[in-house]
Image: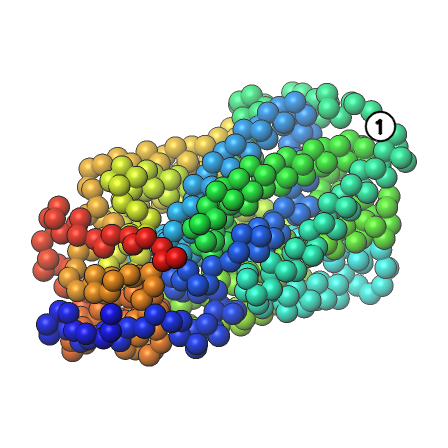
Amino acid sequence: MSGEDRTGSLAPLRVSYEDDPRVVRSAGTEDYALHVAPRTWRSGRVSLLMAWYAFASAMFWLIVGATVSLAVGTRDTLIGLGLSIIAYSVFGTLLGRHAARTGISSALFSRALFGYLGAAVAPLIVGATALYYAVFEGSVVAEVFHQYTGWGNIQIWYLIVAAYSIPIVIGGVRTWLDKLNGVLLPFYYIGLTVAVVWTIVVNGYSNDWLTAGPVDPQANFYAPGWVFAFSVYMGVWIMKPFTWDYARLAKTADATFHKWLTFGPLFYTLTLGVNAVVGIFLAHSLTAGTTLTELSAVQAIVGLTGIFGVALVWVSQTRINTANYYLASINAESFFARVFRIRLPRRVWVVLAGVAVFALMLTNAISYLLKALQWQGVVVVAWVAIALVYLAFARRDRRPSEEFEFRPGRVPAFNVVGLGSWLVASMTGIVMVEAGGSFGATWAPPFAFVIAGVLYAIGRYLTGERHVRLIRPHDPRFEVDDPWEARVECASCERSYIAQEMDRNPATPGHAPICGECGSNDNAYLRAAYAEARTVPTTPVAVDAAPKAPEPRA
């Protein structure tokens, strides 16, 4: 198809079937953070696996398992851990599959859940969480190097760690992060094996760690120990929106591979299971009689194995921080572009993330960061519940993922059902965390999950798609033969993006085409789009008149 005017008075579309070279150059660092990732930009299966497996090597996972085991004992920890692996795998593969089909980030997908303006806080939550984890993991590297070398003060090491982390995250997933993490991945597991074997050689081996009970048998968690363990791992469901942000770069043809290996059972068995078991073993072998913290555990490893321990910590923390900085930067780019209309390249946000990480390290802010992560944990759990219910309704209505609506002029400013469910569930969870004591610590994430899911399901059942999408005429997706292959030139930025993300601007003569990023920054377009939607009757015929997802071209 060419630029033929198929709609009478509408301005003709300038259509091509090749990527815009300017867009491709930008995507080398941006990874289409504010756009739909076209099929030509999707990562190979091994490439994406290597980039995603950066999350598998955080010392954080060792300490979570070890800490929970000291609270409820090894047996209950392993039961809760097994259930968590199942839940993480099921939800991860489900969200990952839909992310690959949509090609949009978790920030853009959140528009379908909460509305264009209502979703603004979603990238803030995801990006801030990634930033906080970068502070934790970077602090570990700095402390280990400071302890091992005895040189300088800790502030200098904070600066060094933040500074060297910035350049290695400038490139996108498929241009650099996959290669770096692919090279470092074997060294992490080699180092972990060396730490375990060395511990056994020096201290001997005993099965006592497998049967160890809680340190305080009188502690009351208001639930069986395995429920507490499962709830703790629910608090780290930030991995679900993280999954979405990586899986959007997957090829749909690789769905089975990613289901089992990248975002499913293999990954979570290694990330949660293996790390937790090693953490429990090391906690009982190296840190007995001391307070277990992330720092005390790695100090014990370094004290035992010397330079090998230092190398293990550097590899593990460098790998995980590539993911933390990447997610912090793409979500910061999305948040500030939408809320403050500040449009900066992702490489700038990487630098600003590094500055923020260094500044937070200097404040010694671990205590209030932990509290912030508890709050964000229940907020994210509520997001996951709403996302899953949304997908369930889409399945019921037989609506393919490719038809999910996220364009700024075709979703309402606020989705009352989604936003209300999220706020009520999140506030309930936060109150439980703050005022519920041990009961709240155990039950806040499950309560937030159930409340969010039930409220959203009831609201969707009663209102249908009234708060999900705006019904407007003149959709560029209808005007091309394949909205996933046809590139349409945006009249505002004069760059071409796939028709899947394009809209027509009712504020311009002839309803000129406009891309998703430009639409997000054009108040006249948004006002005109909302006004146009009010003139169109919301009928079952209009709602169902969505473009059908085309088959991928060979």
Q: Is residue 551 above or below residue 425?
A: below
Q: Is residue 355 above or below residue 247?
A: below
Q: Position of residue 33 (x, y in %)?
A: 44, 63
Q: Is residue 310 left or right of residue 444?
A: right
Q: Residue at point 52% right, 32% down?
A: 86
In-front residue for pair 199/43:
43
**Where does label 1 land, which residue?**
205
Q: Position of residue 51 (x, y in %)?
A: 59, 55
User: Quick one: quadrant of the C terminus?
Assistant: bottom left
Q: Position of residue 378 (x, y in %)?
A: 46, 41
The answer to whether any part of residue 438 appears in the image is: no
Q: Report the residue that reaches farthest toward the right.
A: 202
- Quadrant position of residue 411: bottom left
Q: Amino acid at mark 1?
A: Tyr
The answer to whether any part of residue 151 appears in the image is: yes
User: Quick one: quadrant of the N terminus?
Assistant: bottom left
Q: Residue at point 47% right, 36% down?
A: 90
Q: Is residue 377 left or right of residue 462?
A: right
